[in-house]
Amino acid sequence: GVPINTPRGDIFAVAMDDDTIMISGGFTHLNDFSEPLNSVEQFTFGSQEWGPVDSLNEERGDKQLISLDGKVYAMGGEGRVDASGPATADDVDALAAITLGSVVLDTVEVLDLTADGEVEWVTEGDMPSSLFRFGASAWAEAAAGDDGSEDGGGGGGVIFVFGGQIGFEAECECFRTTEKVLVFDPSKSKTLGALGQEAASAAGVAATSVFVGHVIAIAAAVIVMMLA
């Protein structure tokens, strides 16, 4: 394949359509892994070339990159902080910086590829909590075609976020993993975290199955079913 312009790891790729793939952020040995990148690259199959895209507002590694309804969402992730300055031991973020040099992000950035003119990343909301190294998947709302069948092009949809690691906790001196499943509906609110909080507070999810456009989240005493 055609090499990307900047070597990087801890990244996610997203297919935009039949002709392009986008990657962003991540860590690189070029700066000794001292901080993540905010640069974004897009590969076009027609030209067989990688080209630059507007950079993220925040440097992010170990995040999720999701495509839904003509928009790209960069969610959460890990950053690096400069621990050389003064810090207090009772400050959780400062303690994380001192011990591991990492800070976990809760912000969500959106790139609207359907907008007119030059597109740019916009920070539109926060997740319920800081989160990185998590799984995510988009579920696009289906629309009926001329023959009455569902063609998956109805616009809208939701984003599911599965597990991951949360912000630094002094009790265990670690970034704990979580069992929660969050559901974001961008069409109802630009503050994505509010919707995720409602889903998270409903129940702790024990298992999740995804198949052929259907998502079933099985909780302790709650079953939420979303059918295409």
Image: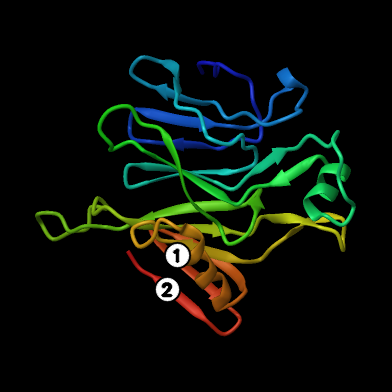
Quadrant the C terminus occupies: bottom left
Q: Position of residue 118 (x, y in %)?
A: 33, 27
* 116 relative to 7 in the view: left or right: left
Q: Nearer the viewer, residue 82 or 151?
A: 82
Quarter location, residue 80: top right
Quarter location, residue 127: bottom right
Quarter location, residue 17: top left
Q: Residue at x 28, y 38 (%)?
A: 114
Rate crowding at label 2 as few (under 14), some (14 to 19) or many (20 or more) other CA atoms within 10 Å: few
Residue ranking furthest to the bottom: 221
* Residue indicated by mark 2: 225
Q: Position of residue 108 (x, y in %)?
A: 51, 48
The kind of residue on which mark 1 rests is Val
Q: Is residue 64 above or below residue 130?
A: above
Rate crowding at label 1 as few (under 14), some (14 to 19) or many (20 or more) other CA atoms within 10 Å: some
Alpha carbons under labels 2 and 1: distance apart: 6 Å
Please report contact status of discs 2 and 1: CB closer than 8 Å, yes or no.
Answer: yes
The disc placed on residue 215 is 1
Q: Is residue 27 above or below residue 200?
A: above
Q: Residue at x 37, y 21 (%)?
A: 45
Q: Position of residue 34 (x, y in %)?
A: 76, 28
Q: Residue at x 26, y 52 (%)?
A: 155
The kind of residue on which mark 2 rests is Met
Q: Residue at x 64, y 41 (%)?
A: 62
